[in-house]
Image: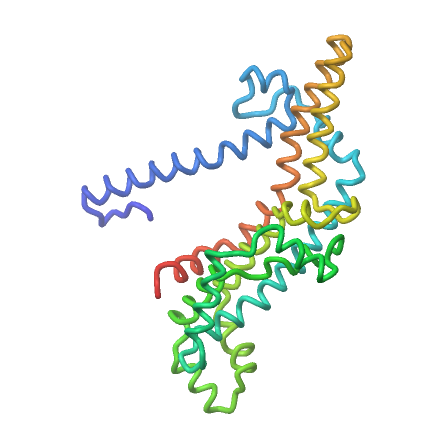
Amino acid sequence: MGISMYDTKGDKVFKAVDIFLLIIITLLCAYPMWFVLIAAVSNPDLVQNGQVMFLPKDFTWDGYQAVFQNNDILIGYRNTIIYTVFGTLLDLVVTLPAAYALSRHDFVGRNIFTVIFTITMFFSGGMIPGYLVVQRMHLINNPLVMIIIGATGMYDIILCRTFFQSSIPSELTDAAQIDGCSNTQLFVKVILPLSKPIVAVMTLFFAISHWNNYFTAMLYLNKPDLRPLQLVLQEILIQSDMMAQLIQNQSVDPATAAKIERTKQLVRYASIVVSSLPVMCLYPLIQKYFVKGIMIGSIKG
């Protein structure tokens, strides 16, 4: 939205105010992320005293060194990437066909299945019955539990169904079926190529959900070599706090205590960057599809 020479005076004022407000909102949203980035490589004493505002000061890599000296970080990264990639693929394989089936008016029992699926949005068995089901399926300490559990949700199905209903003309599907397309061919060769926006949206949603998923691992994974990155980083933070508390209780000299405290602060900021950076790099790649898909899926229908 730019200011044109053909705009009236009122239009120019309106657009100028809009641009100004968008800049302010962008800065308010971007500054916290920028502050974490510079605080992770700055002297924590300067950060604590409020002297680090826009640029790093007294540059240091101690926080990242403390994080990556732990070999569990690489194992956690590997596990999280595996869980995210395969979990996202499974989510797409389950959600998209289910949503397309519910979007077809000729699908017998569509309303019944919709009601059954919708009930799951408001009621669940609970944590203990869920644990017993996972145990009966022999998924305790099994990496498949991070991929299978929560493979889809009714909210995601509704979002995709709305997109299919509002964006895929029924005449197109009718013409494809007249030409001899089966339902599978119709979905794979016609529907999916026209659904890149919603596929991109759901890919981002599912990937972020799997990347940040730590609660499932806390419940069902006890082996250290299966833990995702989030649990590894949590353990590092807990160890840093415990070490600082232990040093304080044993009355260590102030210089050593101060060094431990500075490292603990750096580890906190570095952990945020390490866990968030991959997702932040993913979003710009699919931003154009994300904006289009989420608007179509949320407004129409």
- State left or right for residue 119 relative to residue 239: left
User: Residue placed at 58% from the left, 31% from the top?
Assistant: 36
- x, y (%) of residue 66? 75, 29
- x, y (%) of residue 89? 63, 63
- State left or right for residue 16 relative to residue 150: left
User: Residue placed at 37% from the left, 40% from the top?
Assistant: 22
Colour treatment of the image: rainbow
User: Residue placed at 59% from the left, 68% from the top?
Assistant: 93
Q: Identify the image quadrant of residue 49.
A: top right
Which image quarter holds the C terminus?
bottom left
Q: In this view, does 95 lie above or below 272?
A: below
- x, y (%) of residue 272? 62, 35
Q: Is residue 25 above or below residue 1?
A: above
Front residue of 123/259: it is 123
Front residue of 143/90: it is 143
User: Residue placed at 47% from the left, 68% from the top?
Assistant: 116
